[in-house]
Amino acid sequence: MPENPENERAEVDRLERQIEELSKLVPSDGTASELERMRRRLEKLRKEIYSKLTPWQRVQLARHSQRPIVPDFIDLIFESFVELHGDRRFENDPAMMGGMARFHGEPCIVIGTHKGKDTKQKLQRNFGMPKPEGYRKALRLMKLAEKFSRPVFTFIDTAGAYPGIGAEERGQAEAIACNLREMARLQVPILVTITGEGGSGGALGIGVGDHVLMLEHAYYSVISPEGCAAILWKDQSKVEEAATALKLTSQDLKAFRIVDDVVPEPNGGAHADPKAAASLLDERLQQALAELKAVPIRKLLDNRYQRFRALGSVVEASTGTNTA
């Protein structure tokens, strides 16, 4: 049994290659039994490795190149998705996607950041970093949901809002702030899911909701570990320390009541089995929506307000008292 995490990961890579090679051979009793033995070994190793990831390793996993992105979850969870474009002010922002869909037969509005998969897509989608017109498009779709009494599902996977000059000139901060205000009083259920990266105000711009879910190996933070290390220590070698200090993992955020539900991922992470990851998320979304629909709208809005008012509690080490 490898004692070092690096050795364990190397062992996983070796087993995956051997399984792939054996799978190509002509089936026989010998190869079948060997494949089964290796798969069991791989499953056990993955479970051991992923149960003891550091916060920085979770950040890296949230950025994994094969991790399912927002369009994958939309395709696997929703039916009849029709994308809508444009903010009716400036232009369409490809980094923010959204449209009409059905969730187990019920009409809804789905909104999320789109990172892109290959290099061409990433450039087209601006690496999932929305501009003001992206947030304004999202708000336009939310207002459409309110008009027709449809629940809103938002999916977050972004390093943050785009910080370019053009975005600032067109009111990036105002667009996000406007979304925060309007989402706080939107008169339909809002379900928010962080699927990968949840970076800063760029994530929060579609992150105000009645029920916030987070995939097990995603992260949600006011700043990236790299940015934190640069500001506090001016030293990128402190990035692991920064990731730990930021308390950005799903377990930390659940303990702080910033997220309501941590959705488990398949053994090996969401990228190991995107369909299983989507199925696990689908189950939690169904349960959460059913609970929210049973709440009268005025009570729903009051609960949403109280939920965010309660955030920000700290413990003073000298006295041990809670302070809001």
Image: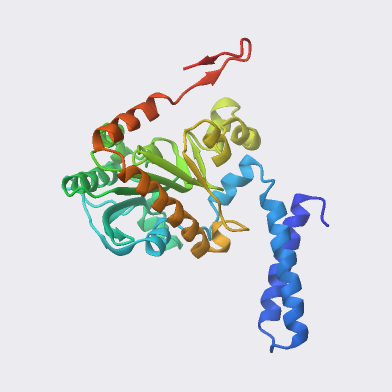
Q: Where is residue 170 in the image (x, y as percent from the top left)?
A: 24, 37
Counting every numbered tag in the picture gives 0
- Please tell me whether residue 252 is drawn above or below residue 47 in the rendered image: above
- Please tell me whether residue 308 is drawn above or below residue 43 in the rendered image: above
Splitting the image into 4 quarters, where does residue 245 fall? top right
Q: Nearer the viewer, residue 303 or 192?
A: 303
Q: Residue furthest front?
A: 294
- What is the image's colouring? rainbow
Q: Which residue lies furthest to the top in this view?
A: 319
Q: Does residue 129 show up?
A: no
Kindly identify the residue that appears in the image at 34 percent across and 41 percent down.
Answer: 206
Kindly identify the residue that appears in the image at 41 percent across and 50 percent down.
Answer: 287
Kindly identify the residue that appears in the image at 53 percent across and 20 percent down.
Answer: 314
Q: Where is residue 84 in the image (x, y as percent from the top left)?
A: 23, 57
Q: Which of 88 and 166 is in front in this view?
A: 88
Splitting the image into 4 quarters, where does residue 267 fall? bottom right
Splitting the image into 4 quarters, where does residue 232 fall? top right
Q: Does residue 64 show up?
A: yes
Quarter containing the N terminus: bottom right
Q: Where is residue 22 in the image (x, y as percent from the top left)?
A: 71, 80
